[in-house]
Amino acid sequence: MSKVDIIVSVRGLNKAFEARNVLKDVYIDFPRGKITSIIGQSGIGKSVLFKTIIGIMTPDSGSIIVDSEDITALPEREKRRIRKRFGYAFQDAALFDSMTVAENISFPLREVLGMKDKKEMRRIVREKLEWIDLPGIENKYPSELSGGMRKRVGVARTLAVEPDILLFDEPTTGLDPVLGANINALIKRVNEEFGITCIVISHDIIGTFKIADKIAFLADGTIKAAGTPAEVAQAEHPILKQFLQNSFTNLEVASPGETEMAG
Ligand SMILES: Nc1ncnc2c1ncn2[C@@H]1O[C@H](COP(=O)(O)OP(=O)(O)O)[C@@H](O)[C@H]1O
Ligand SMILES: [Mg+2]
Protein backbone atom coordinates (compact mmCIF):
# COMPACT_ATOMS: atom_id res chain seq x y z
CA MET A 1 0.00 0.00 0.00
CA SER A 2 1.50 3.34 -0.99
CA LYS A 3 -0.12 6.61 0.14
CA VAL A 4 -3.21 5.48 2.02
CA ASP A 5 -6.00 7.64 3.35
CA ILE A 6 -6.31 6.72 7.04
CA ILE A 7 -9.62 7.32 8.84
CA VAL A 8 -8.75 5.83 12.25
CA SER A 9 -5.27 5.49 13.67
CA VAL A 10 -4.45 3.73 16.93
CA ARG A 11 -1.13 4.90 18.34
CA GLY A 12 0.82 3.48 21.23
CA LEU A 13 -2.22 2.09 22.99
CA ASN A 14 -1.75 0.49 26.42
CA LYS A 15 -4.33 -1.18 28.60
CA ALA A 16 -3.72 -3.28 31.69
CA PHE A 17 -6.05 -5.07 34.10
CA GLU A 18 -4.47 -5.49 37.51
CA ALA A 19 -1.21 -7.29 36.83
CA ARG A 20 -1.96 -8.18 33.23
CA ASN A 21 -0.85 -5.90 30.38
CA VAL A 22 -3.36 -6.80 27.70
CA LEU A 23 -2.46 -4.14 25.13
CA LYS A 24 1.19 -3.09 25.00
CA ASP A 25 1.96 -0.27 22.63
CA VAL A 26 -0.52 -1.17 19.89
CA TYR A 27 -0.19 0.69 16.59
CA ILE A 28 -2.64 0.16 13.75
CA ASP A 29 -4.05 2.27 10.92
CA PHE A 30 -7.46 1.72 9.36
CA PRO A 31 -7.67 2.82 5.71
CA ARG A 32 -10.77 4.82 4.77
CA GLY A 33 -13.45 2.92 2.89
CA LYS A 34 -11.72 -0.43 3.33
CA ILE A 35 -12.32 -3.56 5.39
CA THR A 36 -9.65 -4.19 8.01
CA SER A 37 -9.72 -7.34 10.05
CA ILE A 38 -8.04 -7.98 13.37
CA ILE A 39 -7.23 -11.61 14.05
CA GLY A 40 -5.64 -13.35 17.00
CA GLN A 41 -6.11 -16.01 19.64
CA SER A 42 -8.99 -16.03 22.04
CA GLY A 43 -8.31 -13.98 25.18
CA ILE A 44 -5.52 -12.00 23.53
CA GLY A 45 -7.21 -8.58 23.78
CA LYS A 46 -9.20 -8.14 20.56
CA SER A 47 -12.39 -7.13 22.33
CA VAL A 48 -10.45 -4.79 24.62
CA LEU A 49 -9.01 -3.10 21.52
CA PHE A 50 -12.51 -2.92 20.01
CA LYS A 51 -13.93 -1.30 23.15
CA THR A 52 -11.15 1.28 23.38
CA ILE A 53 -11.65 2.24 19.73
CA ILE A 54 -15.39 2.83 20.18
CA GLY A 55 -14.65 4.71 23.38
CA ILE A 56 -16.44 2.61 25.98
CA MET A 57 -13.14 1.55 27.56
CA THR A 58 -10.45 4.09 28.44
CA PRO A 59 -6.87 3.18 27.55
CA ASP A 60 -4.12 3.72 30.15
CA SER A 61 -2.12 5.62 27.52
CA GLY A 62 -1.93 6.14 23.79
CA SER A 63 -4.18 7.84 21.26
CA ILE A 64 -7.00 7.03 18.92
CA ILE A 65 -7.02 9.49 16.06
CA VAL A 66 -10.22 9.82 14.06
CA ASP A 67 -9.74 12.11 11.08
CA SER A 68 -6.87 13.91 12.81
CA GLU A 69 -8.69 14.37 16.14
CA ASP A 70 -7.39 12.46 19.16
CA ILE A 71 -10.63 11.22 20.69
CA THR A 72 -8.97 10.04 23.90
CA ALA A 73 -8.09 13.67 24.67
CA LEU A 74 -11.51 15.16 23.98
CA PRO A 75 -14.04 16.17 26.61
CA GLU A 76 -17.02 13.81 26.99
CA ARG A 77 -19.38 15.95 24.88
CA GLU A 78 -16.97 16.05 21.99
CA LYS A 79 -16.36 12.32 22.30
CA ARG A 80 -20.06 11.77 21.84
CA ARG A 81 -20.03 13.80 18.63
CA ILE A 82 -17.31 11.57 17.17
CA ARG A 83 -18.94 8.39 18.47
CA LYS A 84 -22.00 9.16 16.35
CA ARG A 85 -19.85 8.35 13.35
CA PHE A 86 -19.37 4.79 14.61
CA GLY A 87 -21.77 1.90 14.31
CA TYR A 88 -20.91 -1.27 16.14
CA ALA A 89 -21.98 -4.74 17.09
CA PHE A 90 -20.47 -6.42 20.14
CA GLN A 91 -19.30 -9.98 20.34
CA ASP A 92 -22.42 -12.15 20.75
CA ALA A 93 -24.36 -9.04 19.75
CA ALA A 94 -27.70 -10.22 20.89
CA LEU A 95 -30.83 -8.38 19.93
CA PHE A 96 -32.99 -7.28 22.83
CA ASP A 97 -35.37 -10.23 23.27
CA SER A 98 -38.16 -8.17 24.75
CA MET A 99 -38.18 -5.76 21.81
CA THR A 100 -39.54 -6.28 18.32
CA VAL A 101 -37.25 -6.12 15.30
CA ALA A 102 -38.42 -2.54 14.63
CA GLU A 103 -37.71 -1.50 18.23
CA ASN A 104 -34.29 -3.13 18.07
CA ILE A 105 -33.29 -1.30 14.88
CA SER A 106 -34.61 2.04 16.08
CA PHE A 107 -32.88 1.69 19.46
CA PRO A 108 -29.60 3.37 18.32
CA LEU A 109 -31.62 6.05 16.52
CA ARG A 110 -33.17 7.05 19.84
CA GLU A 111 -30.17 6.40 22.07
CA VAL A 112 -27.30 7.60 19.90
CA LEU A 113 -28.90 10.19 17.63
CA GLY A 114 -31.68 11.25 20.01
CA MET A 115 -34.23 10.90 17.21
CA LYS A 116 -37.88 11.37 18.19
CA ASP A 117 -39.72 11.40 14.86
CA LYS A 118 -41.61 8.06 14.88
CA LYS A 119 -42.52 8.24 11.20
CA GLU A 120 -38.90 8.82 10.21
CA MET A 121 -37.82 5.93 12.44
CA ARG A 122 -40.35 3.63 10.78
CA ARG A 123 -39.06 4.68 7.37
CA ILE A 124 -35.46 3.94 8.33
CA VAL A 125 -36.40 0.55 9.83
CA ARG A 126 -38.29 -0.40 6.66
CA GLU A 127 -35.39 0.72 4.46
CA LYS A 128 -32.80 -1.26 6.44
CA LEU A 129 -34.96 -4.40 6.50
CA GLU A 130 -35.40 -4.21 2.75
CA TRP A 131 -31.68 -3.80 2.38
CA ILE A 132 -30.94 -7.00 4.30
CA ASP A 133 -33.64 -8.80 2.26
CA LEU A 134 -35.94 -9.30 5.24
CA PRO A 135 -38.79 -6.89 4.47
CA GLY A 136 -41.89 -6.88 6.63
CA ILE A 137 -40.52 -8.50 9.80
CA GLU A 138 -40.86 -5.30 11.86
CA ASN A 139 -43.22 -6.80 14.43
CA LYS A 140 -41.48 -10.12 14.95
CA TYR A 141 -39.56 -10.86 18.13
CA PRO A 142 -35.97 -12.20 17.99
CA SER A 143 -37.15 -15.59 19.30
CA GLU A 144 -39.26 -15.97 16.16
CA LEU A 145 -36.20 -15.62 13.90
CA SER A 146 -33.45 -18.06 12.93
CA GLY A 147 -29.87 -17.47 14.06
CA GLY A 148 -28.87 -16.23 10.62
CA MET A 149 -31.81 -13.81 10.47
CA ARG A 150 -30.98 -12.44 13.92
CA LYS A 151 -27.42 -11.72 12.83
CA ARG A 152 -28.70 -9.91 9.74
CA VAL A 153 -31.06 -7.81 11.83
CA GLY A 154 -28.01 -7.05 14.00
CA VAL A 155 -26.23 -5.72 10.90
CA ALA A 156 -29.33 -3.66 10.00
CA ARG A 157 -29.25 -2.17 13.51
CA THR A 158 -25.61 -1.07 13.10
CA LEU A 159 -26.55 0.61 9.80
CA ALA A 160 -29.48 2.54 11.25
CA VAL A 161 -27.34 5.49 12.37
CA GLU A 162 -25.70 5.67 8.91
CA PRO A 163 -22.18 5.43 10.29
CA ASP A 164 -18.90 6.27 8.51
CA ILE A 165 -17.14 3.53 10.43
CA LEU A 166 -18.60 0.18 11.31
CA LEU A 167 -17.07 -2.21 13.82
CA PHE A 168 -18.00 -5.84 14.30
CA ASP A 169 -16.66 -8.03 17.09
CA GLU A 170 -16.85 -11.68 15.97
CA PRO A 171 -19.88 -11.25 13.70
CA THR A 172 -19.96 -14.90 12.60
CA THR A 173 -19.61 -16.51 16.03
CA GLY A 174 -22.07 -19.35 16.58
CA LEU A 175 -22.99 -19.66 12.91
CA ASP A 176 -22.19 -22.61 10.69
CA PRO A 177 -19.82 -21.96 7.74
CA VAL A 178 -22.63 -21.25 5.26
CA LEU A 179 -24.40 -18.70 7.46
CA GLY A 180 -21.05 -17.23 8.44
CA ALA A 181 -20.27 -16.75 4.75
CA ASN A 182 -23.63 -14.96 4.33
CA ILE A 183 -22.74 -12.48 7.07
CA ASN A 184 -19.29 -11.92 5.58
CA ALA A 185 -20.94 -11.26 2.21
CA LEU A 186 -23.28 -8.79 3.90
CA ILE A 187 -20.34 -6.93 5.44
CA LYS A 188 -18.67 -6.80 2.03
CA ARG A 189 -21.90 -5.35 0.57
CA VAL A 190 -22.08 -2.72 3.32
CA ASN A 191 -18.54 -1.73 2.46
CA GLU A 192 -18.96 -1.68 -1.31
CA GLU A 193 -22.41 -0.10 -1.57
CA PHE A 194 -22.03 2.58 1.09
CA GLY A 195 -18.25 2.97 1.19
CA ILE A 196 -18.32 2.50 4.96
CA THR A 197 -14.99 1.73 6.60
CA CYS A 198 -15.33 -1.65 8.30
CA ILE A 199 -13.29 -2.98 11.21
CA VAL A 200 -13.97 -6.64 11.77
CA ILE A 201 -12.61 -8.71 14.62
CA SER A 202 -12.75 -12.34 13.73
CA HIS A 203 -11.47 -15.81 14.35
CA ASP A 204 -13.14 -16.86 11.09
CA ILE A 205 -9.85 -16.99 9.22
CA ILE A 206 -11.14 -18.16 5.85
CA GLY A 207 -13.89 -15.54 5.79
CA THR A 208 -11.45 -12.87 6.90
CA PHE A 209 -9.00 -13.65 4.15
CA LYS A 210 -11.85 -13.45 1.62
CA ILE A 211 -13.33 -10.09 2.55
CA ALA A 212 -10.56 -8.04 4.19
CA ASP A 213 -8.43 -5.49 2.35
CA LYS A 214 -6.09 -5.40 5.31
CA ILE A 215 -5.41 -7.88 8.10
CA ALA A 216 -3.66 -7.23 11.40
CA PHE A 217 -2.49 -10.00 13.71
CA LEU A 218 -2.59 -9.30 17.44
CA ALA A 219 -0.45 -11.43 19.73
CA ASP A 220 1.21 -10.86 23.10
CA GLY A 221 -0.23 -7.35 23.34
CA THR A 222 0.97 -5.94 20.03
CA ILE A 223 0.30 -6.09 16.30
CA LYS A 224 2.85 -8.60 15.05
CA ALA A 225 2.01 -8.43 11.37
CA ALA A 226 -0.24 -6.27 9.19
CA GLY A 227 -0.83 -5.95 5.47
CA THR A 228 -2.89 -7.32 2.63
CA PRO A 229 -4.21 -10.87 3.08
CA ALA A 230 -1.47 -12.11 0.73
CA GLU A 231 1.21 -10.32 2.73
CA VAL A 232 -0.06 -11.64 6.05
CA ALA A 233 -0.41 -15.19 4.71
CA GLN A 234 3.24 -15.09 3.70
CA ALA A 235 4.62 -13.19 6.69
CA GLU A 236 7.59 -14.93 8.28
CA HIS A 237 6.35 -14.73 11.81
CA PRO A 238 6.43 -17.93 13.89
CA ILE A 239 3.41 -17.18 16.15
CA LEU A 240 1.34 -16.06 13.16
CA LYS A 241 2.24 -19.15 11.16
CA GLN A 242 1.29 -21.34 14.09
CA PHE A 243 -1.98 -19.43 14.55
CA LEU A 244 -2.96 -19.76 10.89
CA GLN A 245 -2.03 -23.43 10.86
CA ASN A 246 -4.11 -24.12 13.99
CA SER A 247 -7.06 -22.18 12.57
CA PHE A 248 -7.14 -24.29 9.45
CA THR A 249 -6.73 -27.52 11.42
CA ASN A 250 -9.55 -26.59 13.81
CA LEU A 251 -11.74 -25.85 10.84
CA GLU A 252 -11.41 -29.40 9.54
CA VAL A 253 -12.55 -30.93 12.83
CA ALA A 254 -15.17 -28.29 13.66
CA SER A 255 -18.69 -29.58 14.04
CA PRO A 256 -21.53 -27.73 12.31
CA GLY A 257 -23.14 -25.02 14.42
CA GLU A 258 -26.58 -23.52 14.11
CA THR A 259 -28.54 -24.12 10.94
CA GLU A 260 -31.00 -21.85 9.16
CA MET A 261 -34.12 -23.02 10.97
CA ALA A 262 -36.50 -20.73 12.76
CA GLY A 263 -37.35 -21.24 16.43
N1 LIG B 1 -13.25 -5.47 32.09
C1 LIG B 1 -12.22 -6.30 32.30
N2 LIG B 1 -11.66 -6.47 33.51
C2 LIG B 1 -10.62 -7.30 33.70
N3 LIG B 1 -10.04 -8.02 32.75
C3 LIG B 1 -10.54 -7.91 31.51
C4 LIG B 1 -11.66 -7.06 31.21
N4 LIG B 1 -11.94 -7.15 29.89
C5 LIG B 1 -11.05 -8.02 29.39
N5 LIG B 1 -10.21 -8.48 30.35
C6 LIG B 1 -9.11 -9.44 30.15
O1 LIG B 1 -8.35 -9.01 29.03
C7 LIG B 1 -7.92 -10.12 28.28
C8 LIG B 1 -8.33 -9.98 26.84
O2 LIG B 1 -9.74 -10.12 26.72
P1 LIG B 1 -10.53 -9.93 25.37
O3 LIG B 1 -10.16 -8.64 24.75
O4 LIG B 1 -11.96 -10.13 25.67
O5 LIG B 1 -9.97 -11.14 24.49
P2 LIG B 1 -10.40 -11.58 23.01
O6 LIG B 1 -9.16 -11.46 22.16
O7 LIG B 1 -10.83 -13.00 23.12
O8 LIG B 1 -11.50 -10.69 22.57
C9 LIG B 1 -8.49 -11.36 28.97
O9 LIG B 1 -7.50 -11.90 29.79
C10 LIG B 1 -9.62 -10.81 29.78
O10 LIG B 1 -9.85 -11.58 30.91
MG1 LIG C 1 -13.43 -11.04 22.08
Image (tube, rainbow, N blue to C red):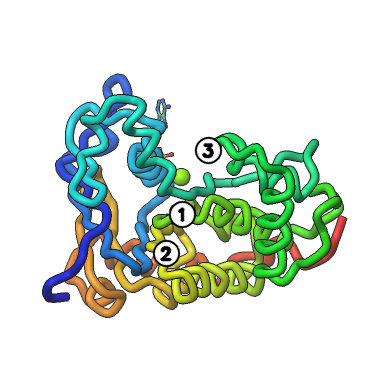
In the rendered structure, the answer to whether residue 122 lies left or right of residue 173 reads right
Label 2 CB less than 8 angstroms from ligand 2: no
Residue 216, horizontal then vertical, whole percent: 28, 61
How many residues crowd mark 3 within 10 Å: few (<14), some (14–19), many (20+)? some
If the image is split into quadrants, where does the C terminus sit?
A: bottom right
Under tag 1, what secondary structure? loop
x, y percent for residue 154: 63, 53
Say the numbered circle drawn on residue 112.
3
Residue 228 image position (x, y, % from top left): 26, 74
Q: Looking at the picture, does residue 75 appear above or below residue 52?
A: above
Q: Are marks 2 and 3 in contact (CB under 8 Å)?
A: no
**What separation in Å lies between label 1 and label 2 (alpha carbons)?**
7 Å
Looking at the rendering, which quadrant does residue 260 occupy? bottom right
Residue receiving disc 1: 163
Q: Which residue is mark 2?
A: 196
Q: Mark 1 near mark 2, Cβ–Cβ under 8 Å?
A: yes
Give, as a three-letter code, the residue at label 3. Answer: Val
Residue pictured at 12% horizontal, 72% vertical: 3
Q: Is residue 19 above or below residue 160?
A: above
| Comes first in the chain, label 1 or label 3 | 3
Amino acid at pointer 2: Ile
Sequence-first disc among 1 and 2? 1
Residue under the image location 37 percent in, 67 percent down? 35
* SS at mark 2 in the image: loop
